[in-house]
Amino acid sequence: MKILMIEDNKSVSEMMGMFFQKEKWEASFAYDGNQAVDMFNEDPNAWDMITLDLNLPGKDGMEVAKEIRKVSKTVPIIMLTARDTESDQVLGLEFGADDYVTKPFSPITLIARIKAIHRRDENMAEKLAESKSVNATVEEADDGFDINTGFFKLNSSTREAYLNEKEIPDLTPKEFDLLKTLASKPKQVFSREQLLELVWDYDYFGEERTVDAHIKKLRQKIEKVGPQVIETVWGVGYKFDDTDAKAKA
């Protein structure tokens, strides 16, 4: 794996460099926002993972994420931040981060997050390759949709989801996976811990606020095209229910 670590604290970079080396990963380091954007743009396809500090000289982490996402919608970004508020976390996700780790962090935690996201992306690529090899007549029979209730449709191959025939806009890879997981079992309640394991592939190292932040952004995008289909089950977690969409169709 080739990692671009964007971090202005050289002690943190040096420490993580030793951990990356132990994993046999190739790492490059940028120490300010402008340098980071330049390094990424030199060869955008070269990077398998980006870790991005929020507080940077030059361009801050939010601006760097925004610049990277103009070029690549898919390269995974883990945001590192000392800010421990939901608004900062949600804003980071809005600018394109796949996940966040709050400082101070354990190197082992960050390594686990990187492995989980990389493993998820590899599995996604394998499934996409398999879907392309499916017999065309089968795809025509089910219109290519993995999930189709008549009011909600989701296609894993194209990474598109529709509510009442309107496409839910600008879904990030993580938001799509989260929506697919919930919609695959309508009305089943998923706990935050289950969603961390199923969508992020996290066990011990997961943060439940990661789920809440992604749900918040996902709901905002769903509401642009129709009624809300993700419900909170207080004290338990979340579920997909398009009953209201049926009523309003």
Image (cartoon, rainbow, N blue to C red):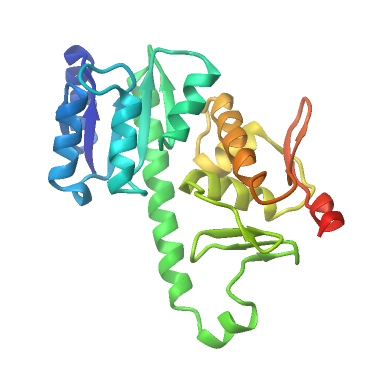
**Residue found 54% across the figure and 50% down from its top:** 176
**The C terminus lies in which quarter of the figure?**
bottom right
Q: Residue at x 79, y 27 (%)?
A: 234
* Nearest to the observer: residue 200 or residue 62: 62
Foreground of the two, 170 or 49? 170
Residue appearing at x 44%, y 56% in the figure: 124
Q: Image check: 180 left or right of 130?
A: right
Identify the residue shown where x is 56% and y is 88%.
137
For residue 205, say whether it is visible: no
The spot of residue 145 in percent (x, y) is 61, 69
The percent coordinates of residue 133 (x first, y second) are: 44, 78
Q: Is residue 226 left or right of residue 34?
A: right
Q: Position of residue 214 (x, y in %)?
A: 56, 35
Q: Quadrant of the N terminus?
A: top left
Residue 142 to residue 109: above or below: below
Residue extending furthest toward the bottom: 137
In the depicted structure, whether residue 220 falls above or below residue 46: above
* Relative image position of residue 28 (x, y in whole percent): 15, 33
Residue sitting at the far right: 247
Number of callouts: 0
Q: Quadrant of residue 26?
A: top left
- Asked whether, in this view, residue 200 is left or right of residue 110, the answer is right
Of 232 and 42, nearer the camera is 42
Asked if residue 135 can be seen in this view, the reply is: yes
The image quadrant of residue 11 is top left
Compared to residue 226, the image places residue 150 above or below, namely below
